Image (spheres, rainbow, N blue to C red):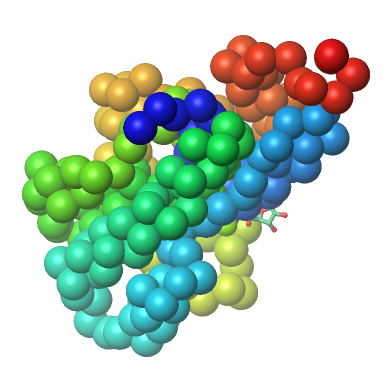
Amino acid sequence: MKKKGVFIAVEGIDGAGKTTQACMLVKKLRQMGYEAAYTTEPTYGRVGDLLRLHVSKQKPRAPLYEALLFAADRFEHVKREIQPKLRRGLVVVSDRYLYSSLAYQGAAGVSLPWLREVNFFAPKPDLTFYIDISPAKSLKRKAGKVGAYESLSYQKKVRKIYLDMAEEEGFTVLEGEKGAEELHRDMLSKVLKLLPKPRKGGG
Ligand SMILES: Nc1ncnc2c1ncn2[C@@H]1O[C@H](COP(=O)(O)OP(=O)(O)O)[C@@H](O)[C@H]1O
Ligand SMILES: [Mg+2]
């Protein structure tokens, strides 16, 4: 299979600004004449719906079960959405991806090598952004929105795994406390380095 598009993942703890930035990026790329698609995990497919229900209701958590559901959801995401769009040459921006599973289920005690193994089918993004904020900031930004992953100690563990992976895998780490516009400019400039000139106006 020949891949023509560019695959970008946006990662970070809750409230880091992933959705804000992924949407700004896609909007800007489209304005510039690129074909770009926003997508997110968990997906809005059947397994994704099940996951959201589970994550919001299930106490105590069942990390291994969640890891398998996230992997199944990702399998559908990759096969039905990401790969077909990349084959069509799109820039695909995923708001959370594989590394969310590694960080969150890893922080809940699931073995990282095993998590990698069950996600073996997931292609490596061409570019992964890790938007870094402190767990304290995360709680502040998400105040009022009750999430399953909100405890401070848990978010600290998640962030530690993300930062370790960022170093090992060469993620682009961004300071998430910067303003949204500044972050957007930083991300856009990295992305544009991977793209040919846009069709619109470029000829
Ligand atoms: N750079 C930023 N500076 C300050 N607040 C931000 C920034 N980016 C996003 N926010 C705000 O923080 C909250 C969480 O942002 P969001 O993009 O939903 O984060 P995530 O998708 O990573 O959970 C939102 O209320 C959003 O408006
Ligand atoms: Mg979000």
Work out which quarter of the rendered image holds the N terminus and state it. top left
Q: Nearer the viewer, residue 62 or 144?
A: 62
Q: Which residue lies furthest to the right in this view?
A: 201
x and y percentages locating residue 102 in the rendered image? 26, 47
- Left or right of residue 118, residue 97 in this image: right
Residue at coordinates 58% horizontally, 32% vertically from top-left? 89
Q: Which image quadrant is residue 168 in?
A: top left
Residue 28 appears in the figure: no
Q: Closest to the observer: 179 or 81? A: 81
Left/right of residue 146 with respect to residue 35 in the rendered view: left
Residue under the point 36% across and 60% down: 76
Q: In which quarter of the image is residue 70?
A: bottom left
Residue 42: % across, % down: 44, 63
Tell me if I can see residue 27 in this picture: yes
Q: On screen, 120 above or below 169? A: below
Between 44 and 5, the one lying in front of the other is 5
The image shows residue 146, relative to residue 180, as above or below, that is: below
Which image quarter holds the C terminus? Answer: top right
Image point (30%, 84%), residue name: 58
Q: What percent of the width, then of the height, locates residue 138? A: 53, 54
